[in-house]
Image (tube, rainbow, N blue to C red):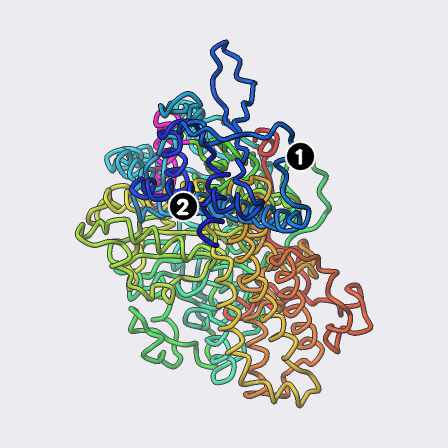
Amino acid sequence: MCIPLLTWILGIFCGDRGTASVDLLCFEFLGLRSSWWVLLRKAMDHARAALSSLFSAEPMSYTRFSIARQTDGDNSHVEMKLSADDEEGVDIERPEHVHDSMAQPQRNGKKLCFLVIAAVLLLLIGFLIGYLSYRGRMQLAARCQDGSGRCEITPTASYLVDGDETVEEEIQGPPVIYWPQLKAMLSDKLLAKNLGDRLRQRAGLDSFEAGEAEDTNMATYIHEQFNSFFLDKVWNDEHYIKLQIRGSTKNKVSVLINDSEEILEMPDAYVAYSESGSFSGKPVYVNYGLKKDIETIQKSVTPLNGTIVIVRAGKITLAEKVANAKEAGAVGVLMYMDSFKYGITGTLTPFGHAHLGTGDPYTPGFPSFNHTQFPPVESSGLPHIAVQTISSSAAAKLFSKMDGDSCSEDWKGGIHSCKVTTKQESKIMVKLDVNNSMKDRKILNIFGAIQGSEEPDRYVVIGAQRDSWGPGVAKAGTGTAILLELARVISDIVKNEGYKPRRSIIFASWSAGDYGAVGATEWLEGYSAMLHAKAFAYINLDAAVLGANHVKISASPLLYMLLERIMKGVKDPAQGSRTLLDRVGSDWVKAVVPLGLDNAAFPFLAYSGIPVVSFGFYNKDEEYHFLNTKDDTLENLRKIDNLDALLRAAAEVAGQVALRLTHDHELFLDFGRYGEELLAYQEKFLPYVKDVQELGLTLDWLFFARGDFQRAADALRRDIANSDRENKVIRRALNDRIMKVEYDFLSPYLSPKEVPFRHVFFGRGTHTLQSLVEHLQLLKTGKSEVDLNLLKEQLALATWTIKGAANALGGHPMGSVTRALQPPWLRGSSRDTVPPLRHRWARGDAGAQSGAANGPELHACPGTEAEL
């Protein structure tokens, strides 16, 4: 019975078209082989007779429909042929009355039953055909996207009603460019020679100080270059900032011995945002100026109140060294570059700044636009102690004057005459005269944009610092050269190769980067209310090549997977037979360098919650000792082997990141990676579970929040897998959930003005997970030093920030969390009743634990939203 029923259904579906070719066409459409057609055709004939006898005692013709072209040209007529046997020459006697051919009444139920079954089967067959067709297309598209399969476009065809001829439909719109093709275009068009030529723009010039003529001329050149590349939009923004510059008289470092002054050095370089004036104090050497270094000296040698501390460069930024020294009570800081870390430095003196933050410290929390009315406040990141850099030769001379104990071997570095301090009865003092002055400057940020075809209001930003205190070829020249070459190449691919990025690409040239990413930070501050919902990644190009031996990567965990894919496809410039991934190894994530305050990508990540990546080459064991000095010239940079190839490799990685993020339907951000980061922190918390319980607290709520985030990530994966990729509205909503993951780790319970770097993973302050770990460690090493109220506050901030990120990732509002799930220390209270937050500018080695801060600066650019 099943065979006749199936063949009857096929007969209904295909019908009797009057010609064998049409029937054959129908069977082929259903996916059946043509060799089966003869057998099925005969089976259908037997099935008709069986069904006729089933429904009535007499053979009965079934009704079928045929759409045939009429001789008069009218295709609207539907001809009903009542007998398949008419075509075969068999005459069947038809009753004169319709009622004569009706089945018996008792068979009506069976007929209805079979009709229902046939309809259901037809629906199932149609659904399966449609599903398999859609699935096949999606699998092909997926293979094309990741480059794992052949990418062919099969033209669609329509079956004509008057024959089996086909006609190809013309597909309108831009040509489809798959990812393998796109990255090949980028690789082919990037020219190492162009990168080398662009570096020569800085040759022969001594300085590109922010706001000065050379910096402005370079800004004009970049603006003109962007226009020559035919970018969709080119614009600039102006900021009016306060900079501290070197005074008319050089700063001076002297040694006082029995009231006799001996000048050690009058360096050309200076430290911006140092306190000006004359300061003197007992010299004390504190190694790198880490918190643990200072604690070692305080416990075993001498207090640092009223002293001038000597530190060597490295490990942490100069601003962090100064903050640690100020916290310990020092009145001044001298820093030198040790030959052990920097090679032969001689008389080299580096430029630096002492602001523990980013942006203009005199407009904290506000963009420095000319029309803005600023409150009379300043950033608490300003040190208000004297700071100066000196050469290693001057430092060696100073150590030779000191008559105290020698340094330990691991503190000596390249100066073997190193002394910790002077004898207690000694009258040897260091005098520091700082003559810096404040100056109002106008700076320019230059922007160029390639507009996205599908989501022009979503963009990736590629940026590089333009200014430098000296020639700045390595510091600013390499990044600027890569920025211009990428703008040229990507614009060429869009204009001449037909590539249409789904999302926009913004190229940015920042000014005042040497003063703490001032230009970039001002832009961020100006658009802080909307940038997290618009910009989904920042690619930093600064100091892209400082050596040749190692790869240096700093990035948000969201971009780890993308970076690994890209490094797998970029050749190692040192050995073309292998890739960059071969060079860094499969466990390269362990070698990721944490972002510091001296990296322009830091405010994008820690202040604005935008995923970032900074990629380049360096020598891990030896710093590039010309950086931030007057000798940062093209001649010295050319001493790096294979420089042009290294620049090209860095440019290719940055270009692929930008293109991949604007090419795919789904944003290539690994939102589940933070689940692994949270799990790693949970393992750090586990040893302190019992110690916390003894205080009447629990870590369970923090662990629950981590589990919530993991479940939310799994739910989003399911939503993406079950969504329609072709539905732009759904795709945009899912991408928005992905791109907000980074932003949701900015603690919403902290004021951006008081604590600008609110990121719980990468921020600065007691709210960070690292700060919580350090506080928990005191439960083992010094329980009396534990601040119970602060610990409660830290647990609350960490728990609810992670919980909020989980809710946002899962597509649920924060308010959906019931009060029954609240931790005991928050139950019965609201967000407004969370204990006041005591801001500490930096934890760990940076840790200046001063009072509430107005914070590092972050500002903006008029035109970004309007232009795009």
Q: Where is residue 134 in the image (x, y as percent from the top left)?
A: 46, 44
Magenta segment includes 473 = yes
Picture residue at 60% right of the left edge, 75% below the top: 703
Which is nearer the eye, 589 or 669? 669
Query: What residue does disc 1 label?
Result: 99
Task: Pick whichever of labels 2 and 1 is earlier in the sequence.
Answer: 1
Which is nearer the eye, 556 or 794? 556
Image quadrant in which you'd find residue 416: bottom left
Residue 559 in view here: yes
Which is nearer the eye, 772 or 108? 108
Residue 136: numbered disc: 2
Find numbered disc 2 in the image and state the secondary structure of the residue it sits on.
helix
Q: Going by the image, does 594 lie left or right of 364? A: left
Task: Check the image and report above or below for 696 versus 861.
Answer: below
The kind of residue tagged 1 is His
Picture residue at 65% right of the left edge, 33% below the top: 370
- Magenta range: 470-499
Magenta segment includes 249 = no
